[in-house]
Image (tube, grey):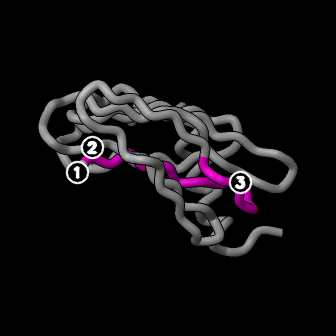
């Protein structure tokens, strides 16, 4: 059974999945420092661009756990870095290594956590 919070997140994820995550992956830069966030379920892929950092990730699952794998890249020589965070349905969080200076591309794999829903965000700062 899902908790009430998981049901709310799952509903939001299904609505987002119906849109195929196109808005976040094709909308272009959202402005320096503004995170790009996607609520995702197993098998989903996402990408984001803040104007100074970009990232791509895939959501992976097994029978009871979820995690994200991908890369983050610093795209502008502005002294800022790019990184990805994950918020799990149980409330725990994870943060990737920071990619910087410009041109640095860092691969990541978040630790598995119980659940079938994850919120992934690209940050720059």
Q: Are discs 1 and 3 less than 8 Å apart at CB?
A: no
User: Is residue 119 magenta-colored?
Assistant: yes
Locate the N terminus by quadrant: bottom right
Residue where numbered disc 1 is placed: 125
Seen from the viewer's position, the closer of residues 65 and 72 is 72
Give the total number of marks visible in the rendering.
3
User: Is residue 123 magenta-colored?
Assistant: yes
Q: Earlier in the sequence, mark 2 or mark 3?
A: 2
Whether residue 47 appears in this view of the structure is: no
* Measured Cα–Cα span from mark 1 to mark 3: 26 Å
Which of pointers 2 and 3 indicates the residue nearer the eye? 2
Q: Are discs 2 and 3 less than 8 Å apart at CB?
A: no
Q: Earlier in the sequence, mark 1 or mark 2?
A: 2
Decide whether the magenta segment is chiefly helix, strand or loop.
strand
Q: Residue at x 38, y 35 (%)?
A: 48
- Secondary structure at numbered mark 3: loop
Residue where numbered disc 2 is placed: 81
Q: Residue at x 29, y 33 (%)?
A: 74
Q: Earlier in the sequence, mark 1 or mark 3?
A: 3
Against 73, is 67 above or below? below
Q: Residue at x 57, y 32 (%)?
A: 45
* Measured Cα–Cα span from mark 2 to mark 3: 25 Å
Whether residue 53 appears in this view of the structure is: yes
**Which corner quadrant of the image does residue 50 belong to?**
top left
- Secondary structure at numbered mark 2: loop
- Secondary structure at numbered mark 1: loop
Residues shaded magenta: 110-124
Residue where numbered disc 3 is placed: 112
């Amino acid at each position: 059974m899902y908790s009430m919070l998981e049901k709310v997140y799952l509903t939001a994820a299904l609505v987002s999945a119906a849109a195929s995550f196109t808005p976040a992956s094709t909308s272009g830069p959202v402005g320096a420092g503004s995170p790009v966030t996607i609520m995702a379920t197993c098998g989903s892929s996402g990408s984001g661009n803040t104007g100074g950092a970009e990232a791509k990730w895939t959501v992976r699952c097994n029978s009871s756990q979820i995690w994200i794998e991908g890369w983050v890249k610093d795209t502008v020589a502005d002294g800022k870095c790019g990184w990805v965070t994950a918020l799990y349905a149980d409330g725990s969080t994870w943060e990737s290594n920071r990619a910087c200076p410009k041109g640095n591309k860092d691969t990541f794999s978040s630790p598995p956590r119980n659940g079938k829903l994850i919120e992934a965000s690209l940050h720059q700062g």
